[in-house]
Amino acid sequence: MESVSPMKIKYLTYPLGILLSAVLTGCSTTPEKTPEQTPVETPVVINDYPTRDRVEYVLNCVAQHGGLTYINQYACGCKIDKIAEKLNFSEFESAKTFTYLSKGQTGDAGAVFRDPAQSKDLRTRLKEAEASAEKSCFIK
C-alpha cells in the first residue's frame, strides 16, 4: 500500500474544508421565519349548521316520512349531512326562508321573495341538494 504524504492530505482537506464552510455558511444565513411571518391557515368549517337546526330538520323530515323509526331517523340525519356538504348554513337558511315565504304569499306580495335571481338560485340549489340527498340516503 502506498503511503500518503502530509502534503497530499493538506491539498485534499483544504477543498473539503472550503466546501464544508460554504455549506454551513449558506445554511446559517438563511433567514428563519418568525411567528408573525408564518401564514396562519384558517380552518375549513365542515359543520357550520347549529345542532338545533339539524335536529329541527331531522324531526320535520321524520314526520314527513312516516314517523319516528330508526331507519327514518338515520336517513333524515344522513339527508341533512348531505345537504350540508352542498350548502353552507347561511345559504341553506336563506333558501328555506325564500321557499317558505314564496309559497306563503301570492301575487305581488310574494314576488319579492319569489322573483329575485338570488331567491331562484338558492331555491334551485336547495331542491337539487335535497333530491341528491334523498337518493344517497335512501329516503322513501
Image: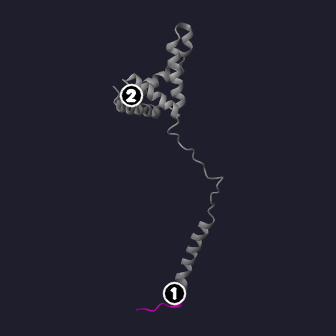
Q: Amino acid at mark 2?
A: Leu
Residue 4 lies in magenta, yes or no?
A: yes
Q: Is residue 115 above or below residue 8?
A: above
Q: Nearer the viewer, residue 75 or 68?
A: 68
SS at circle 2 = loop
Q: Quadrant of the N terminus?
A: bottom left
Q: Is residue 78 above or below residue 5?
A: above
Distance between mark 1 and mark 2 Cα atoms: 90 Å
Query: Whole-percent x and y of residue 127?
Result: 43, 23
Q: Residue at x 53, y 16 (%)?
A: 101
Residue 108 lies in magenta, yes or no?
A: no
Q: Residue at x 48, y 31 (%)?
A: 55
Q: Residue furthest top?
A: 107
The residue that disc 2 covers is 68
Q: Amino acid at mark 1?
A: Lys
SS at circle 1 = helix
Q: Earlier in the sequence, mark 1 or mark 2?
A: 1
| Residue 63 shown left or right of residue 36 in the figure | left
| Residue 63 shown left or right of residue 28 in the figure | left
| Residue 51 shown left or right of residue 132 in the figure | right
Q: Residue furthest front?
A: 68
Q: Nearer the viewer, residue 11 or 24?
A: 24
Bin the neighbour count of mark 1 within 10 Å (Cα to Cα): few under 14, some 14-19, many 20 and up: few
Prevailing secondary structure class for the magenta stretch in the rendered image: loop
Q: Residue at x 59, y 66 (%)?
A: 27
Image depth: mark 1 or mark 2 in front: 2
Q: Nearer the viewer, residue 26 or 123?
A: 123
Q: Nearer the viewer, residue 10 or 20?
A: 20
| Range drawn in magenta | 1-8
The residue that disc 1 covers is 8
Q: Quadrant of the C terminus?
A: top left
